[in-house]
Image (cartoon, rainbow, N blue to C red):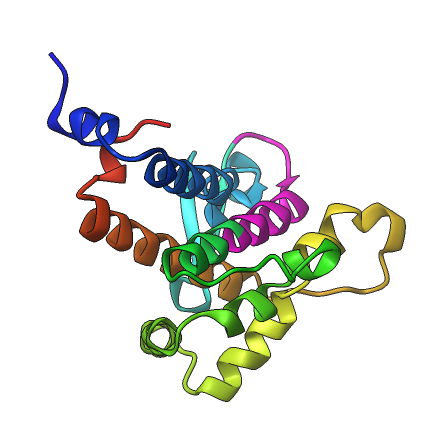
Amino acid sequence: MESLNSKIYKNLPEEHKKRIIMYLTARQFKNAVLIEEMTIVPAKKNGLPENCIISFNDGLLKLTARGDKIVSKHYPFLVNKSFACEVYLKFLLLENNITFNDLKGKSGHDLLMLYNKLPLIIRQTLLKFLQNKGTPSNESLITKLKSVSQAFIQWRYIYEKFDGISADFCFLNVFCDFLDIYCQKTILEKYKYDVNLDIR
């Protein structure tokens, strides 16, 4: 039997379905490498239980103890999270009838540029969300956003140009979480579609 959620989706206009697919694409990139999977350390060698998660930086940064090898997924984490943020931001721009056709090439990946195009109400909501996570002011939000704004461009070809580039993993993760929550809320309110029931 077809679920109510499936019926809602089936009856949506094609443009709204595309927006939902856009959100789902971003979510898959967001979840490709979770922050606790970014670094895996050997469990037994470190006297830790298998699959235990160790938190740092007030729980914003985590690592997992598992197996007998060190596994680092920093580059995929940064590339996937930053691309997810880009797609979430473009989704929100479309939802607010804001075009981004003027952003071609590298500019289209620039998170700060996309963020600055968002309506003020979304930027204010983001600031409130981040204040609860330790980012106290709009100036520090902009500074942190600048630090990850080019992450997709910088980190996807890191082997070609490594020169001490750094990125704020914790901020990028929290920023991505906010965008995900805000997009989910937008879809539920506007389309009455619950993306949490969608397995894509």
Residue 16 vs residue 50, the one in the foreground: 16
Q: Is residue 74 magenta?
A: yes
Residue drawn at the location 63% of the way across and 43% of the way down: 76
| Picture layout, residue 173 above or below residue 8 | below
Asked whether, in this view, residue 40 is left or right of residue 56, the answer is right
Q: Is residue 61 at least partly visible in the picture?
A: no
Residue drawn at the location 51% of the way across and 37% of the way down: 32
Residue drawn at the location 54% of the way across and 54% of the way down: 86
Query: What is the chief secondary structure element of the magenta stretch?
Result: helix
Within the image, what quadrant is residue 31 found in? top left
> x and y percent of residue 15 in the render?
38, 39
> x and y percent of residue 126 in the render?
37, 72
Within the image, what quadrant is residue 161 found in? bottom right
> x and y percent of residue 174 in the render?
43, 62
Asked whether, in this view, residue 178 is left or right of residue 157, the answer is left
Give the magenta part as a residue range.
67-86
What residue occupies the far top of the structure in this picture? Answer: 1
